[in-house]
Image (cartoon, grey):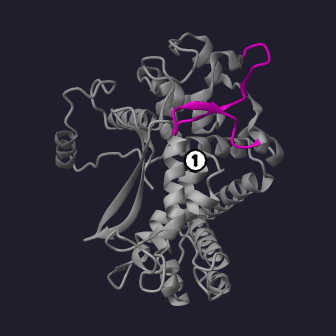
Amino acid sequence: MAKAKKRTDGRYSVSLVVGHKDGKPIRKSFYSRKSIADARRQRDEWMDTHEYGHDGVPTERLDGGITLSAWAEKWIASYKSNLTPNTRDYYRNQTNAICDYMADGVRFGDMPMCAFKPIHISTYLSTLAGKSKSTIRGRKMTLQQLFTTARQNGIIERDICADLAETAQTVRVKGTYEGHHALTREWINIINAHWSEHRFGIYALLAIWTGMRPAELCALRWEDVDKDANVLRVRRSLDIRHGSVEKDTKTECGVRNIPMFATVRHALFSGAAKRNSEYICARPNGQPYGYESLSDAWESFRGFLERIANGVPHPESAQGFRKDKWVAKLTEQKKEWIVFDYTLYDLRTTFCTTLYDAGVDIKTAQKYMGHKDASTTLRIYTKLSDERENDSASAVDAFIGKTYTVKAI
């Protein structure tokens, strides 16, 4: 479902995908001079009285009923309308991914709901191997809700919900993606030494040494710095996807105090961090970050770090720098370009790893991280413990191989 917007003529517009033709979506628009809510009301009323065909022509039945794409649109509008914008976006992304899947040359979204069989679900779930566990869980949950509500509304007669639940248990797709990972000490040292040379540096430094979520860091103000108590007070977050408006933290446990360690104190009180806004981590114009500006700033900072790691002169400026030429130069020297292969959220994971390495107990780590459930912190700690155990075993094995005569099998 497309985003609502205000047109240049002053009218509010909301569009709806009503079908597909030649692989391209067909949209129907609804307009209002009053408000976006009124345009959405018109859309919802139209959806209540129409179903949509492949060519976008309203029809009562299409090969036995409404398509998955059409039902997904109505499902989000009817069952997810009271959720936060971010949560609605989450379900919209899930349904889009499911509808775009192609089976035997047919797009899932173009199939009538009543045409689905358990084998379709099994086939789709099997394609999720290698995705993160949270992605697999989200797709299963969304599929089950789509078909359950469809049966409840008489769109499908067969109790496919029961079949789906059984399929989800039978097809035990396990994610092989290990999730976020911590920065190496080499990268942490580079950031500690050079953060003040880049406009995004203060954000990265605070993320590594406070573990705050991206949206929490975007909302952090100078007034939240309590020098006397030596803590940062996390009280709010920023909805960077929807206008950068302030909102509550992700959970009640998100409201917390985080100690200011030496690196943070130096950055905030030495004058190295530029203060051009009420927000500590702000854009050059002093305005808070939005989703795109945050992504752009992160990409710029990643490039900055890579230029430092690869010995590029004047890494703080990318002007006139040609990465392809530098890579060719390294290739001649039989070297490879060092890549900073981390995500923004990996900075938060780095802080949790530091707590583990420092011997901080799980309950305290849970408090600092703002986790609602200690099991979330425990999963990270357990993973780190397993990694350390494997590293230790490998180190001992390597030592034995270098020190003693050992026959390999």
Seen in the picture, residue 391 relative to 119 is either above or below; the reply is: above
Seen in the picture, residue 371 relative to 227 is either above or below; the reply is: below
State left or right for residue 214 relative to residue 120: right
Instruction: State the image coordinates of residue 121 (x, y, percent, origin top left).
Output: 53, 82
Q: Is residue 88 magenta?
A: no
> SS at mark 1?
helix
Which quadrant holds residue 7?
top left
Which quadrant holds residue 264?
top right
Q: Is residue 248 magenta?
A: yes
Residue of label 1: 86
Image quadrant occupied by the N terminus? bottom left
Residue 363 visible in the shown view: yes
Q: Residue at x 48, y 76 (%)?
A: 66
State left or right for residue 334 relative to residue 212: left
Three-letter code for the amino acid on which mark 1 is drawn = Asn
Q: Residues within 10 Å of mark 1 (few under 14, many from 20)?
A: few
Q: Residue at x 63, y 20 (%)?
A: 221
**Closest to the observer: 138 or 126?**
138
Q: Residue at x 60, y 16 (%)?
A: 268
Instruction: State the image coordinates of residue 230 (x, y, percent, origin top left).
Output: 75, 19
**Closest to the observer: 249 or 371?**
249
Q: Residue at x 68, y 31 (%)?
A: 236
Seen in the picture, residue 203 relative to 185 is either above or below; the reply is: above
**Closest to the observer: 259 or 31?**
31
Q: Which residues are magenta?
A: 226-251
Q: How many marks?
A: 1
Instruction: State the image coordinates of residue 46 (x, y, percent, origin top left).
Output: 49, 60
State left or right for residue 290 relative to residue 379: left
